Image (cartoon, rainbow, N blue to C red):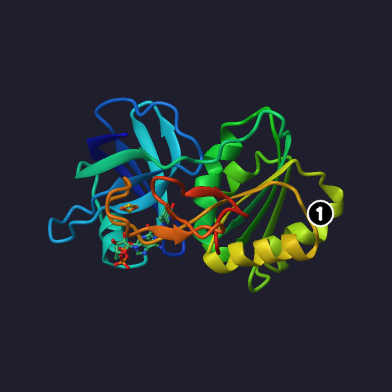
Amino acid sequence: MKELISTVKEVKLIADNVYSLTVTLPEPVGKVRGGQFLNISTGDSSRLLKRPLGIVKAEGCFVTVCFQVKGEGTKALAEARTGDKLSVLLPLGNGFILPESAKNIVVIGGGVGIFPLVPVICGNGDKNFYTYIGFRNKGCACLLDEFEKSAKLTIVTDDGSMGERDNAVNAYLKDRENVKADLIIACGPPVMLRALKTQLKEKGIDTPCLVSLEERMGCGIGACLVCVCDKSDGTKARVCKDGPVFNIDEVEL
Ligand SMILES: Cc1cc2nc3c(=O)[nH]c(=O)nc-3n(C[C@H](O)[C@H](O)[C@H](O)COP(=O)(O)OP(=O)(O)OC[C@H]3O[C@@H](n4cnc5c(N)ncnc54)[C@H](O)[C@@H]3O)c2cc1C
Ligand code: FES
Protein backbone atom coordinates (compact mmCIF):
# COMPACT_ATOMS: atom_id res chain seq x y z
CA MET A 1 0.00 0.00 0.00
CA LYS A 2 1.31 3.43 -0.98
CA GLU A 3 0.23 7.03 -0.72
CA LEU A 4 0.83 8.77 -4.04
CA ILE A 5 -0.09 12.08 -5.64
CA SER A 6 -2.13 11.30 -8.72
CA THR A 7 -3.01 13.54 -11.63
CA VAL A 8 -6.55 13.54 -12.98
CA LYS A 9 -6.54 12.26 -16.56
CA GLU A 10 -10.26 12.13 -17.28
CA VAL A 11 -13.65 12.42 -15.58
CA LYS A 12 -16.56 11.04 -17.62
CA LEU A 13 -20.30 10.76 -17.00
CA ILE A 14 -21.10 7.07 -17.63
CA ALA A 15 -24.69 6.81 -16.32
CA ASP A 16 -27.22 8.93 -14.43
CA ASN A 17 -25.22 10.60 -11.65
CA VAL A 18 -22.37 8.09 -12.11
CA TYR A 19 -18.86 9.04 -13.23
CA SER A 20 -15.64 7.30 -14.11
CA LEU A 21 -12.44 8.95 -12.98
CA THR A 22 -9.05 7.97 -14.37
CA VAL A 23 -5.92 9.21 -12.68
CA THR A 24 -2.25 8.88 -13.56
CA LEU A 25 0.11 7.75 -10.82
CA PRO A 26 3.81 8.61 -10.63
CA GLU A 27 4.59 4.88 -10.61
CA PRO A 28 2.83 1.66 -11.72
CA VAL A 29 0.33 0.33 -9.23
CA GLY A 30 1.10 -3.36 -9.81
CA LYS A 31 -1.44 -6.18 -9.67
CA VAL A 32 -4.82 -5.28 -8.19
CA ARG A 33 -7.56 -7.76 -7.30
CA GLY A 34 -11.25 -7.05 -7.78
CA GLY A 35 -12.65 -5.83 -4.47
CA GLN A 36 -9.51 -3.93 -3.55
CA PHE A 37 -10.08 -0.23 -3.27
CA LEU A 38 -8.32 3.09 -3.03
CA ASN A 39 -8.84 6.02 -0.72
CA ILE A 40 -8.85 9.28 -2.63
CA SER A 41 -8.75 12.88 -1.50
CA THR A 42 -11.49 15.08 -2.86
CA GLY A 43 -9.30 18.02 -3.74
CA ASP A 44 -10.46 20.33 -0.93
CA SER A 45 -8.50 20.61 2.29
CA SER A 46 -11.72 21.34 4.24
CA ARG A 47 -12.70 17.69 3.63
CA LEU A 48 -9.88 15.87 5.35
CA LEU A 49 -11.12 12.32 4.94
CA LYS A 50 -10.37 10.50 1.75
CA ARG A 51 -13.24 8.57 0.09
CA PRO A 52 -13.05 4.79 -0.48
CA LEU A 53 -13.80 3.65 -4.05
CA GLY A 54 -13.39 0.22 -5.62
CA ILE A 55 -10.65 -0.05 -8.22
CA VAL A 56 -12.25 -0.80 -11.59
CA LYS A 57 -9.10 -0.84 -13.71
CA ALA A 58 -5.39 -0.62 -12.93
CA GLU A 59 -3.04 -0.63 -15.90
CA GLY A 60 0.52 0.56 -15.50
CA CYS A 61 0.31 4.06 -14.07
CA PHE A 62 -3.42 4.49 -14.86
CA VAL A 63 -6.15 3.71 -12.37
CA THR A 64 -9.88 4.05 -12.96
CA VAL A 65 -12.64 4.20 -10.37
CA CYS A 66 -16.35 4.71 -10.94
CA PHE A 67 -18.64 6.38 -8.47
CA GLN A 68 -22.12 7.66 -7.86
CA VAL A 69 -22.41 11.21 -6.57
CA LYS A 70 -23.71 10.87 -3.01
CA GLY A 71 -22.50 13.84 -0.97
CA GLU A 72 -19.94 16.62 -1.00
CA GLY A 73 -16.89 14.43 -1.57
CA THR A 74 -18.13 12.56 -4.62
CA LYS A 75 -19.63 15.79 -6.01
CA ALA A 76 -16.17 17.38 -5.83
CA LEU A 77 -14.64 14.35 -7.56
CA ALA A 78 -17.20 14.62 -10.35
CA GLU A 79 -16.13 18.24 -10.83
CA ALA A 80 -12.39 17.46 -10.88
CA ARG A 81 -10.54 18.75 -13.93
CA THR A 82 -7.78 17.17 -16.02
CA GLY A 83 -4.48 17.99 -14.35
CA ASP A 84 -5.89 18.31 -10.81
CA LYS A 85 -3.75 16.63 -8.15
CA LEU A 86 -5.46 14.14 -5.83
CA SER A 87 -3.77 12.14 -3.12
CA VAL A 88 -4.51 8.39 -3.28
CA LEU A 89 -3.79 5.53 -0.93
CA LEU A 90 -3.77 2.17 -2.72
CA PRO A 91 -4.31 -0.71 -3.12
CA LEU A 92 -6.34 -1.30 0.06
CA GLY A 93 -8.21 -4.32 1.40
CA ASN A 94 -8.03 -7.99 0.54
CA GLY A 95 -10.17 -8.30 -2.61
CA PHE A 96 -11.80 -11.42 -4.04
CA ILE A 97 -9.44 -14.40 -3.96
CA LEU A 98 -10.72 -17.05 -6.34
CA PRO A 99 -9.61 -20.59 -5.50
CA GLU A 100 -7.90 -22.46 -8.33
CA SER A 101 -10.58 -25.17 -8.08
CA ALA A 102 -13.47 -22.74 -8.68
CA LYS A 103 -14.12 -22.72 -12.42
CA ASN A 104 -17.78 -21.68 -12.63
CA ILE A 105 -18.39 -18.51 -10.72
CA VAL A 106 -21.69 -16.74 -10.15
CA VAL A 107 -21.27 -12.97 -9.89
CA ILE A 108 -24.08 -10.93 -8.33
CA GLY A 109 -23.90 -7.14 -8.34
CA GLY A 110 -26.29 -4.37 -7.46
CA GLY A 111 -25.99 -0.67 -8.28
CA VAL A 112 -22.55 0.81 -7.59
CA GLY A 113 -21.65 -2.60 -6.14
CA ILE A 114 -20.94 -3.75 -9.69
CA PHE A 115 -17.71 -1.71 -9.87
CA PRO A 116 -15.37 -3.91 -7.77
CA LEU A 117 -16.59 -6.94 -9.74
CA VAL A 118 -15.21 -5.66 -13.06
CA PRO A 119 -11.55 -6.59 -12.42
CA VAL A 120 -12.63 -10.05 -11.30
CA ILE A 121 -14.35 -10.73 -14.62
CA CYS A 122 -11.77 -8.98 -16.76
CA GLY A 123 -8.72 -10.43 -14.96
CA ASN A 124 -9.58 -14.14 -14.75
CA GLY A 125 -9.92 -15.42 -18.30
CA ASP A 126 -9.62 -19.06 -17.17
CA LYS A 127 -12.94 -18.92 -15.26
CA ASN A 128 -16.55 -19.03 -16.47
CA PHE A 129 -18.55 -16.17 -15.02
CA TYR A 130 -22.35 -16.25 -14.80
CA THR A 131 -23.23 -12.68 -14.00
CA TYR A 132 -26.45 -11.18 -12.65
CA ILE A 133 -26.44 -7.41 -12.26
CA GLY A 134 -29.24 -5.15 -11.17
CA PHE A 135 -29.77 -1.42 -11.62
CA ARG A 136 -32.51 0.96 -10.50
CA ASN A 137 -33.37 1.67 -14.16
CA LYS A 138 -31.87 1.73 -17.65
CA GLY A 139 -30.33 5.16 -17.07
CA CYS A 140 -28.23 3.76 -14.20
CA ALA A 141 -26.77 0.91 -16.27
CA CYS A 142 -23.08 1.20 -17.09
CA LEU A 143 -19.90 -0.79 -17.84
CA LEU A 144 -21.95 -3.36 -19.72
CA ASP A 145 -19.11 -4.01 -22.20
CA GLU A 146 -16.96 -5.26 -19.32
CA PHE A 147 -19.70 -7.56 -18.06
CA GLU A 148 -20.31 -8.88 -21.59
CA LYS A 149 -17.07 -10.84 -21.06
CA SER A 150 -19.12 -13.18 -18.84
CA ALA A 151 -20.11 -16.61 -20.16
CA LYS A 152 -23.65 -15.48 -19.41
CA LEU A 153 -24.90 -12.01 -18.49
CA THR A 154 -28.32 -11.25 -17.03
CA ILE A 155 -29.31 -7.62 -16.47
CA VAL A 156 -32.37 -6.72 -14.43
CA THR A 157 -33.82 -3.41 -13.29
CA ASP A 158 -36.14 -2.33 -10.48
CA ASP A 159 -38.59 -0.83 -13.00
CA GLY A 160 -38.17 -3.26 -15.90
CA SER A 161 -36.76 -0.56 -18.21
CA MET A 162 -33.84 -2.90 -19.05
CA GLY A 163 -34.11 -6.68 -18.78
CA GLU A 164 -36.73 -8.16 -16.48
CA ARG A 165 -38.22 -6.25 -13.59
CA ASP A 166 -36.36 -7.96 -10.76
CA ASN A 167 -33.32 -7.78 -8.52
CA ALA A 168 -29.98 -9.48 -9.09
CA VAL A 169 -30.35 -12.03 -6.27
CA ASN A 170 -33.72 -13.24 -7.56
CA ALA A 171 -32.41 -13.32 -11.12
CA TYR A 172 -29.70 -15.76 -10.00
CA LEU A 173 -32.06 -17.85 -7.88
CA LYS A 174 -34.49 -18.26 -10.80
CA ASP A 175 -31.62 -19.43 -13.01
CA ARG A 176 -29.68 -21.49 -10.53
CA GLU A 177 -30.69 -24.91 -11.87
CA ASN A 178 -28.90 -23.94 -15.11
CA VAL A 179 -25.65 -22.92 -13.41
CA LYS A 180 -23.52 -25.32 -11.39
CA ALA A 181 -21.57 -22.77 -9.44
CA ASP A 182 -18.36 -23.54 -7.55
CA LEU A 183 -18.36 -20.09 -5.98
CA ILE A 184 -20.65 -17.08 -5.65
CA ILE A 185 -19.25 -13.58 -5.32
CA ALA A 186 -21.40 -10.55 -4.61
CA CYS A 187 -21.21 -6.83 -4.04
CA GLY A 188 -24.11 -4.47 -3.58
CA PRO A 189 -26.18 -2.60 -1.04
CA PRO A 190 -26.60 -4.16 2.44
CA VAL A 191 -30.23 -5.06 1.67
CA MET A 192 -29.08 -7.10 -1.34
CA LEU A 193 -26.39 -8.94 0.61
CA ARG A 194 -28.83 -9.68 3.46
CA ALA A 195 -31.36 -11.07 0.98
CA LEU A 196 -28.65 -13.22 -0.58
CA LYS A 197 -27.60 -14.64 2.79
CA THR A 198 -31.21 -15.38 3.79
CA GLN A 199 -32.09 -16.98 0.46
CA LEU A 200 -28.97 -19.16 0.34
CA LYS A 201 -29.83 -20.43 3.82
CA GLU A 202 -33.54 -20.93 3.14
CA LYS A 203 -32.90 -22.77 -0.11
CA GLY A 204 -30.11 -24.88 1.38
CA ILE A 205 -27.56 -23.66 -1.17
CA ASP A 206 -24.16 -24.45 0.29
CA THR A 207 -22.02 -23.01 -2.52
CA PRO A 208 -19.18 -20.96 -0.95
CA CYS A 209 -20.03 -17.27 -1.17
CA LEU A 210 -17.81 -14.21 -0.85
CA VAL A 211 -19.30 -10.76 -0.32
CA SER A 212 -17.71 -7.32 -0.42
CA LEU A 213 -19.03 -5.03 2.33
CA GLU A 214 -19.40 -1.29 2.30
CA GLU A 215 -19.03 0.58 5.60
CA ARG A 216 -18.38 4.20 6.36
CA MET A 217 -14.64 4.59 6.53
CA GLY A 218 -12.11 6.92 8.05
CA CYS A 219 -8.46 5.98 7.61
CA GLY A 220 -8.93 2.99 5.27
CA ILE A 221 -5.86 1.27 6.73
CA GLY A 222 -7.08 -0.38 9.92
CA ALA A 223 -6.19 2.32 12.43
CA CYS A 224 -9.34 4.27 13.34
CA LEU A 225 -11.94 1.46 13.77
CA VAL A 226 -14.69 3.54 12.08
CA CYS A 227 -15.45 0.65 9.74
CA VAL A 228 -15.80 -2.16 12.27
CA CYS A 229 -18.46 -4.80 11.53
CA ASP A 230 -19.83 -7.70 13.57
CA LYS A 231 -18.64 -11.21 12.84
CA SER A 232 -20.87 -14.23 13.27
CA ASP A 233 -18.61 -15.61 16.03
CA GLY A 234 -19.24 -12.51 18.18
CA THR A 235 -15.91 -10.83 17.37
CA LYS A 236 -15.39 -7.70 15.26
CA ALA A 237 -13.58 -7.08 11.99
CA ARG A 238 -12.28 -3.97 10.27
CA VAL A 239 -13.90 -3.81 6.85
CA CYS A 240 -11.00 -1.79 5.40
CA LYS A 241 -8.19 -4.06 6.56
CA ASP A 242 -9.69 -7.49 7.28
CA GLY A 243 -12.09 -7.09 4.32
CA PRO A 244 -13.87 -5.65 2.47
CA VAL A 245 -14.34 -9.19 1.14
CA PHE A 246 -15.57 -11.78 3.64
CA ASN A 247 -17.11 -15.19 3.51
CA ILE A 248 -20.87 -14.56 3.75
CA ASP A 249 -21.16 -16.86 6.80
CA GLU A 250 -18.36 -15.03 8.56
CA VAL A 251 -20.15 -11.69 8.99
CA GLU A 252 -23.44 -10.35 10.31
CA LEU A 253 -25.30 -8.58 7.51
C1 LIG B 1 -14.59 -0.51 0.26
C2 LIG B 1 -15.56 0.49 -0.35
C3 LIG B 1 -15.62 0.59 -1.71
C4 LIG B 1 -16.51 1.49 -2.29
N1 LIG B 1 -16.56 1.55 -3.64
C5 LIG B 1 -17.40 2.40 -4.23
C6 LIG B 1 -17.42 2.49 -5.64
O1 LIG B 1 -16.68 1.80 -6.37
N2 LIG B 1 -18.28 3.38 -6.21
C7 LIG B 1 -19.12 4.17 -5.44
O2 LIG B 1 -19.91 4.93 -5.99
N3 LIG B 1 -19.10 4.10 -4.09
C8 LIG B 1 -18.26 3.25 -3.47
N4 LIG B 1 -18.22 3.22 -2.10
C9 LIG B 1 -19.05 4.17 -1.34
C10 LIG B 1 -18.38 5.55 -1.33
O3 LIG B 1 -17.18 5.47 -0.59
C11 LIG B 1 -19.29 6.61 -0.71
O4 LIG B 1 -20.44 6.78 -1.50
C12 LIG B 1 -18.56 7.93 -0.61
O5 LIG B 1 -17.50 7.85 0.33
C13 LIG B 1 -19.51 9.03 -0.19
O6 LIG B 1 -18.76 10.20 0.01
P1 LIG B 1 -19.41 11.64 -0.10
O7 LIG B 1 -18.44 12.62 0.44
O8 LIG B 1 -19.95 11.90 -1.45
O9 LIG B 1 -20.68 11.49 0.83
P2 LIG B 1 -20.86 11.98 2.32
O10 LIG B 1 -22.09 11.34 2.80
O11 LIG B 1 -20.77 13.46 2.37
O12 LIG B 1 -19.61 11.34 3.08
C14 LIG B 1 -19.26 11.69 4.36
C15 LIG B 1 -18.29 10.67 4.91
O13 LIG B 1 -18.87 9.38 5.01
C16 LIG B 1 -18.13 8.41 4.28
N5 LIG B 1 -19.12 7.59 3.57
C17 LIG B 1 -20.34 7.97 3.16
N6 LIG B 1 -20.99 6.96 2.59
C18 LIG B 1 -20.18 5.91 2.65
C19 LIG B 1 -20.27 4.56 2.23
N7 LIG B 1 -21.36 4.08 1.64
N8 LIG B 1 -19.21 3.76 2.43
C20 LIG B 1 -18.11 4.22 3.02
N9 LIG B 1 -17.96 5.48 3.47
C21 LIG B 1 -18.97 6.30 3.27
C22 LIG B 1 -17.29 9.21 3.33
O14 LIG B 1 -16.09 8.53 2.99
C23 LIG B 1 -17.04 10.46 4.11
O15 LIG B 1 -15.97 10.25 5.00
C24 LIG B 1 -17.35 2.33 -1.49
C25 LIG B 1 -17.25 2.23 -0.11
C26 LIG B 1 -16.37 1.31 0.47
C27 LIG B 1 -16.30 1.22 1.94
S1 FES C 1 -11.46 2.90 8.14
FE1 FES C 1 -10.11 3.16 9.82
S2 FES C 1 -9.99 1.15 10.63
FE2 FES C 1 -11.17 0.89 8.84
Q: Residue furthest front?
A: 234
Q: Residue 251: where, in percent of width, then height?
A: 55, 57
Q: Position of residue 88 (x, y in %)?
A: 27, 42
Q: Secondary structure at mark 1?
A: helix
Relative depth, front residue between 188 and 232: 232
Could you tell me which residue is drawn at 58 percent across and 53 percent down?
Answer: 250
- Residue that numbered label 1 is attached to: 176
Image quadrant where residue 197 sits = bottom right
Would residue 73 be found to the left or right of residue 244 on screen? left
Q: Residue furthest right?
A: 177
For this rendering, which residue is in front, 201 or 183?
201
Within 10 angstroms of label 1, few (less than 14), some, or many (20 or more) residues? Answer: some
Is residue 44 something one can see in this rendering? yes
Amino acid at dot 1? Arg
Report the residue that reaches farthest toward the left: 45
When the figure is inspected, residue 122 is found, relative to residue 155, above or below; the finding is above
Q: Quadrant of residue 151?
A: top right
Q: Residue at x 75, y 40 (%)?
A: 182
Vertical position of residue 70 compared to residue 106: above or below: below
Instruction: Give the quarter the ligand 1 occupies.
Output: bottom left
Q: Quadrant of the C terminus?
A: bottom right
**Picture layout, residue 71 above or below residue 101:** below
Seen at 44% across and 42% down, the residue is 36
Can residue 163 be seen here? The reply is no
Q: Position of residue 162 (x, y in %)?
A: 66, 64
Q: Position of residue 169 (x, y in %)?
A: 69, 61
Quarter containing the N terminus: top left
Q: Is residue 144 left or right of residue 216?
A: right
